[in-house]
Image (spheres, grey):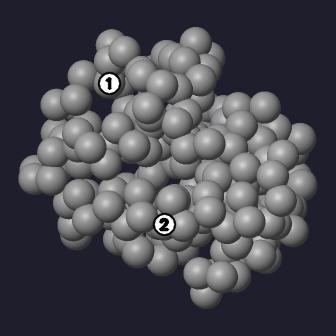
Amino acid sequence: MTADARPVICFVCTGNAARSVMARRMFAELAPGYRATSAGTLVLEGHPMSSRTRSALRDHGLTDPDHRSRQFGTEQAAADLVVAMEPDHVSWVRRHHPEAADRTATLPRLVRDLPAAGTLAASVAALGLATVEVEPWEEVVDPASGDQAVFDDCAVELHGLVEALAARLPDPS
């Protein structure tokens, strides 16, 4: 069996039960030339996504029945790009996995600033992410304490952001 040589994009949220799960699944659909993974910064390992996340994904014609939450660790820090859902996640990666700091940014910042030309590595390097000051506008708000409508709104926001990110990334082939 051959190892998957596609560039890895790791989506990160807090519990790996809502935002990163939805973003990962949407990205996998939109950018099959990349391998999408997800993880969280404070995770109860092995839990399925919430029923509200499942329903929000279903509204986008997507499922992910095999998802189980996982803690961000060394494997995820090796990703070609780490896509965080909020400034606190970027700070957490910088503290716990400084080797990934130069490849870690929030989804809104990447959509706004990632150069749309060149290789993924060159585009990410051009941003100087290890020292970028992360700002409050970069947050995709956690729907965790909300009702189904809050999860659905988050999924709509994520779909737009993930679609924009996929459009900015170079064809990895």
Quickly name the residue at label 2: 159
Q: Position of residue 28 (x, y in %)?
A: 49, 70
* Left or right of residue 66, residue 104 in this image: left
Kindly identify the amino acid type of the residue bearing the numbered disc 1. Answer: Leu
Q: Position of residue 128 (x, y in %)?
A: 24, 22
Q: Which residue is nearer to you in this view: 113 or 97?
A: 113
Residue that sits furthest to the left in the current view: 117
Query: Does residue 85 lie above or below 99 as drawn?
Result: below
* Left or right of residue 98, residue 152 in this image: right
Secondary structure, mark 2, is helix
Quickly name the residue at label 1: 129
Give the crowd class for mark 1: few <14, some 14-19, many >=20 residues within 10 Å. some
| Residue shown at 59% from the left, 23% from the top | 88
Q: Position of residue 131 (x, y in %)?
A: 33, 13
| Residue shown at 84% from the left, 46% from the top | 145
Query: Does residue 69 lie above or below 93 as drawn?
Result: below
Give the crowd class for mark 2: few <14, some 14-19, many >=20 residues within 10 Å. many
Q: Earlier in the sequence, mark 1 or mark 2?
A: 1
Query: Does residue 52 lie above or below 121 as drawn?
Result: below
Q: Which residue is nearer to you in this view: 158 or 3?
A: 158
Kindly identify the amino acid type of the residue bearing the numbered disc 2. Answer: His
